């Protein structure tokens, strides 16, 4: 027979909530609105939700649990331990697990604004989908967010384009139509490309996918501003730099065709075996970009190296006194001798060479000359 107990006495024998306990004699358990009791017998499991007074028979294992409360931005997964099936429950809701079900942790939805997107991988099929805001995203049990996480859409306007790769075909595409760009599932965004703008005195060289060069000039209408295509790249050169031109530290992607000057220091030796340090200034410019690119990849280095060779030879033919009297004339004649074609063959024009300073490499000899 069932045994009825008073509420006061029942509180002494009621099992502790959230913990499973064995009931040795029959009694009632009173459940609140957010509670559920799980009653396990030898061959069955029964779940009862509150509010309710539940009669529990002897030799039953009971567990009173709180329901999982979800607000409108939360969700959870409920797993059936017999079948392995997992279902998603989205708030607002008070969630209880049925027989053989386990309620998982509470998860927050992913909120996307109107300029945001996320790529979602379905682990069961391997397919990828792109979800675009505004939206609150509740992931299904087999879904997960890709590693890059939530991303902003890319603004495409007259000055910015998006370079993407189609992962299905491997082809690249440059998106130039003004929009907020959201990629397709098969798109990988490589980079954002800016529209290149040239001044009147600038020239840029584009290397195409077939290796051919295309020249863009700032003083030609229609070539002043451009996007580098998906299979193209700006030609980049590294010219000799520094006062002694021993390293190629000057990186260029745009060429300035205005007249310019360049300093260069090196050592020479006179006929009477005095070693000197020379500091020169070259006034030069690029006269023909196409010819320069076809002949040399280091215009500044070529100018300095050739001039140094010619000046060293000229200085070695005169003594110190003669050189100090006529150093500008000697250097100019060495660089601009009749029949010289070295610079023009490279599309360069050297208009003038000036000596900035002359000093002795040996400090003692320099002191004697000063005295």
Image (cartoon, grey):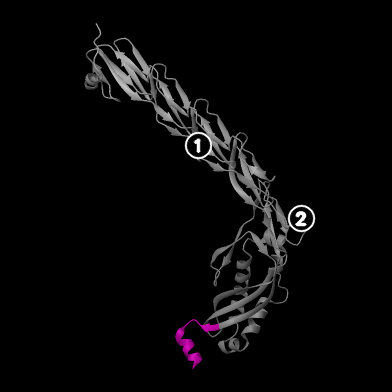
Residue 76 to residue 248: above or below: above
The location of residue 348, given as percent across then percent down, is 69, 68
Among the 4 quarters of the image, the one containing residue 318 = bottom right
Q: Residue at x 72, y 67 (%)?
A: 287
The location of residue 357, given as percent across then percent down, is 56, 82
Which segment did they paint magenta? Answer: 358-371
Give neighbour class at mark 1: few <14, some 14-19, many 20+ (Cα, 10 Å). some
For marks 1 and 2, give the one nearer the viewer: 1
Q: Nearer the viewer, residue 370 or 31?
A: 31
Residue 251 to residue 4: above or below: below
Query: Number of numbered discs present?
Result: 2
Asked which secondary structure carries label 1, the reply is strand
Q: Nearer the viewer, residue 206 or 322?
A: 206
Give neighbour class at mark 2: few <14, some 14-19, many 20+ (Cα, 10 Å). few
- Determine the residue located farthest toward the bottom in the rendered image: 371
Report whether 348 appears left or right of 112. right
Q: Which residue is mark 2?
A: 222
Q: Which residue is mark 1?
A: 110
């Amino acid at each position: 027979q069932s045994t009825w107990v008073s509420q006061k006495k029942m509180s002494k024998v009621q099992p502790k909530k959230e913990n499973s306990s064995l009931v040795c004699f029959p009694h009632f358990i009173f459940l609140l609105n957010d509670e559920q009791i799980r009653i396990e017998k030898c061959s069955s499991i029964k779940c009862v939700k509150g509010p309710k007074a539940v009669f529990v028979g002897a030799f039953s294992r009971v567990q009173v649990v709180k329901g999982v409360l979800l607000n409108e931005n939360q969700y959870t997964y409920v797993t059936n331990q017999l079948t392995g099936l997992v279902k998603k429950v989205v708030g607002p809701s008070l969630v209880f697990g049925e027989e053989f079900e386990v309620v998982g942790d509470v998860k927050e939805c992913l909120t996307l604004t109107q300029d945001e997107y996320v790529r979602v991988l379905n682990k069961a099929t391997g397919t990828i989908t792109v979800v675009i805001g505004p939206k609150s995203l509740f992931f299904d049990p087999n879904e997960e967010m890709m590693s890059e996480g939530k991303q902003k859409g890319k603004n495409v306007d007259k000055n910015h384009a998006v370079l993407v790769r189609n992962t299905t075909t491997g082809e690249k595409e440059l998106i130039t139509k003004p929009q907020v760009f959201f990629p397709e599932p098969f798109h990988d965004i490589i980079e954002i490309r800016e529209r290149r703008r040239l001044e009147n005195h600038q020239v840029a060289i584009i290397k195409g996918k077939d290796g051919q060069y295309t020249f863009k000039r700032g003083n030609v209408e229609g070539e002043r501003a451009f996007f580098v295509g998906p299979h193209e790249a700006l030609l980049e050169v590294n010219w000799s730099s520094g006062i002694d031109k021993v390293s190629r530290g000057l990186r260029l992607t745009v060429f300035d065709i205005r007249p310019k000057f360049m300093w260069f220091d090196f050592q020479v030796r006179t006929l009477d075996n005095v070693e000197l340090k020379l500091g020169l200034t070259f006034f030069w410019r690029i006269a023909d970009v196409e010819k320069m690119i076809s002949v040399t990849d280091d215009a500044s280095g070529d100018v300095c190296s050739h001039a140094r060779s010619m000046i060293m030879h000229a200085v070695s033919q005169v003594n110190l006194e003669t050189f100090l009297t006529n150093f500008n004339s000697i250097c100019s004649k060495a660089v601009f001798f009749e029949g010289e074609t070295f610079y023009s063959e490279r599309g360069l024009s050297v208009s003038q060479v000036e000596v900035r300073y002359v000093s002795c490499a040996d400090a003692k000899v320099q002191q004697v000359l000063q005295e």
